[in-house]
Image: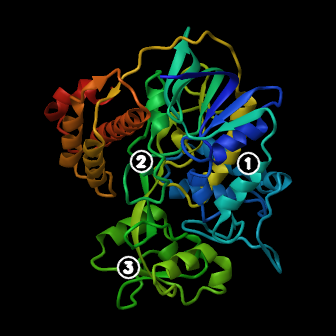
Amino acid sequence: MSLQFEKVDVLIVGAGLAAVTVALHLPHTLNVLLVSKHEVTSANSDLAQGGIASSYLESSSVDHERDTLVASKLAAMPDRVYTLVEEGRSAIRDLERFGVVFDRDETGYAVGREGAHGMNRIFHVGGDETGRHVMATLRRQLPDNVTVMEHVLIDSLLKSDGRVSGATGYNGETRLHVQAGAVVLATGGIGGLIDWTSNCRSVTGDGLVLAHEVGAVLTNLSRIQFHPTLLAVESPHLVTEALRGAGATLVDASGRHVMAYHPLGSLAPRDEVARTLTRHDGVVYLDTSRVERIAERFPKLVATCDAHGIDVCQIPVRPGLHFHMGGVDVDADGRTAVAGLYAVGEVADSGVHGKNRLASNSLLECWVFGKRVAATVTVEEKPLTVNETTVYEVSLDLFSRYRQQIGEWLTISPQIGEIASFLENTQQLVQTKHMSRQLSEQTLSLKAARLLARAMIETEDGYEQDRFARTADGISK
């Protein structure tokens, strides 16, 4: 097998807003390599429809802070939330300096409102295609010291003298070794592990595995958010929450408002809406009859409905996996427990989301904490010592069956028996030194799913310790 070697100051694993924010703000004297698992546009940031939440136009960040904490079920870390919303007040101005042009109307910024927000504070670009426009603009601003490589799979991190010293993986099908003075994980969440999700298929928890295997701490992995409104067709498409902020309501087949019981109605926190829709007997629709200028404000939605022959005035929806609040434990500047390793964005448990993320705080988190990581990164060259790597010897057919099994328990109402069955079925997987990119990618997905499964079992009140004791040794391997 051919081998490619790279030596850089900073390796950034990921290509979404968190990764690009770090790359934009690192000193231009550093040699930076940013790698994307597939095309750079295969990032959840590019799919973001709702926009960016910011109290930029408010007299203070107090209300945004309160809304974030309440939505989190008071489980977020208050000091981190304060950092997010206070430093996030300047995010709109900062992004404009990089060329981002936010939507405006005759009164100024055309800010919207989404679930659990007490007021309009969601900034959009291109209506419901904020992510695509923001990412295209920012990627054009990447400086010359940043090299971008697509189709790079990082499958393991390397350590020397207790510090991360680089990584191994594949550039296409070519084996790749990267020596790096620091590594930043910005790999996104876990949504791609299953089919019914708003996430890119490539976002499969790789960063959790990479961090865990070099000794970083993982926290709150069972905190998973399900978005209430994915288009209820054969393949999932996100229906932005901003539609409800613009006046759409969730109704049943008879037109009854299914969230009428809640003080915030259809703009209740995502977890509460998703649970209600999951329990509801029958199809739930978004009634958009009160939404003004829908084609102008939500062009992507209208095009998607047209392509599926759906009346945009009555859109069938159902919940789907959306966001991971847990992840790699980091401090306020993105440092992990391992020297030289940082994490930012959805892969990190930054402490700002608690048990339920407030709508449109995700892009804000990427920007705020991406800047903090860039200001904190220290580069220290260590010799690259490549360890022997093994992968699970799993056929594509068997992997597909495992993936289907993951989809059966990675749901809003997980069944512990199905989780236990998955852990037991995958515990004795044979490992091989005969590696390929496909086997490496499948192995990362299965390991990430096992980490999630174990965390979900451990947080289940009815968990029987002795029943699963025989699997404990192999669960995190």
Circles 2, 1 touching at the beta carbon (< 8 Å): no
Q: Which residue is mark 3?
A: 284
**Percent position of residue 353, x then y:** 53, 49
Q: Earlier in the sequence, mark 2 or mark 1?
A: 1
Foreground residue among 414 and 147: 147
Q: Which residue is mark 2?
A: 223
Foreground residue among 476 and 142: 142
Q: Quadrant of residue 336?
A: top right
Amino acid at circle 1: Arg
Secondary structure of residue under mark 3: strand
Characterize the local packing of mark 2: few (<14), some (14-19) or many (20 or more) Cα atoms within 10 angstroms.
Answer: many
Q: State the mark number for residue 139.
A: 1
Q: CA distance from mark 2 to mark 1?
A: 31 Å
Foreground residue among 251 and 181: 181
Residue at x 44%, y 67% (from the top left corner):
228
Amino acid at circle 2: Arg
Outermost residue, right side: 97
**Percent position of residue 262, x then y:** 44, 74
Q: Which quadrant of the figure contains the C terminus?
A: top left
Mark 2 or 1: in front is 1
Q: Quadrant of residue 453?
A: top left
Q: CA distance from mark 1 to mark 3?
A: 38 Å
Residue at x 81%, y 30% (from the top left corner):
27
Is residue 384 among what the camera can see?
A: yes
Secondary structure of residue under mark 1: helix
